[in-house]
Image (cartoon, grey):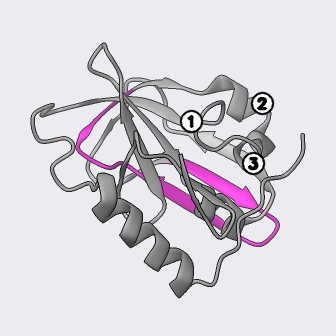
């Protein structure tokens, strides 16, 4: 895992280069969550709500809504697909997003409408790492994760 200005940036993810990460699973589902820089900018997440399992979401339509003391906003679907699971632990403990944004605090599992194209507009590898570092610099973010 690389790190920049205290922000963890796992190389095994695909990124929308704004605030969302995606990790393909062995069963054809994709985990979706928010990045370490995004959780830092949001502040302590106090509420997390999700679209119901079975909901079809078009790309860029929200699959979840997060609220902190200083921010509230939707987490957009990275591709057209169906929500097949939500992270019930995050629903019960939204602050987990500020502790473990890449592992324990994934938000939803989605099945894409077109698995062959699901990752086509997302970035990975050095191009993603460079773009994420530029995002961190643009917003002047120094990441920190909260203790549980």
The circle on residue 106 is 1
Residue 5, image x, y percentages: 65, 70
Q: Nearer the viewer, mark 1 or mark 2?
A: 1
Residue 66 magenta-drawn? yes
The boundaries of the magenta stretch are: 64-83
Mark 1 Cα-neighbour bin, 10 Å: few <14, some 14–19, many ≥20:
many
Return the disc, 1 or 2, that comes first in the chain's sequence.
2
Per the image, the residue denoted by label 3 is 47
Q: Regarding mark 1 in the picture, which secondary structure is present there?
A: loop
Q: Among all residues in the image, which is located at the extreme top?
A: 27
* Separation of residues labelled 1 and 3 (CA atoms): 14 Å
The answer to whether marks 2 and 3 mark residues whose Cβ atoms lie closer than 8 Å is no
Q: Is residue 64 left or right of residue 105?
A: left
Task: Examine the rendered structure and indicate whether residue 147 appears above or below residue 108.
Answer: below
Residue drawn at x 26%, y 48% is 58
Q: Regarding mark 2 in the picture, which secondary structure is present there?
A: helix
* Separation of residues labelled 1 and 2 (CA atoms): 13 Å
Residue 130, image x, y percentages: 38, 70
Residue 112 magenta-drawn? no
Residue drawn at x 68%, y 70% is 41
Mark 2 Cα-neighbour bin, 10 Å: few <14, some 14–19, many ≥20:
few
The answer to whether marks 1 and 3 mark residues whose Cβ atoms lie closer than 8 Å is no
């Amino acid at each position: 895992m690389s790190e920049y200005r205290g922000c963890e940036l796992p190389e095994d993810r695909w990124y929308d280069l704004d605030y969302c990460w995606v990790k393909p699973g062995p069963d054809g589902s994709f985990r979706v969550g928010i990045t370490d820089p995004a959780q830092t900018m949001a502040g302590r997440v106090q509420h997390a709500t999700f679209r119901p399992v079975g909901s079809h979401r078009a790309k860029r339509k929200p699959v979840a809504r997060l609220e902190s003391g200083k921010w509230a906003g939707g987490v957009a679907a990275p591709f057209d697909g169906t929500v097949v699971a939500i992270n019930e632990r995050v629903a019960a403990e939204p602050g987990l997003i500020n502790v473990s944004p890449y592992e324990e605090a994934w938000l939803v599992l989605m099945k894409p409408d077109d698995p062959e194209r699901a990752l086509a507009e997302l970035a990975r590898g050095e191009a993603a790492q460079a773009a994420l570092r530029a995002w961190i610099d643009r917003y002047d973010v120094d990441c920190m994760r909260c203790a549980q």
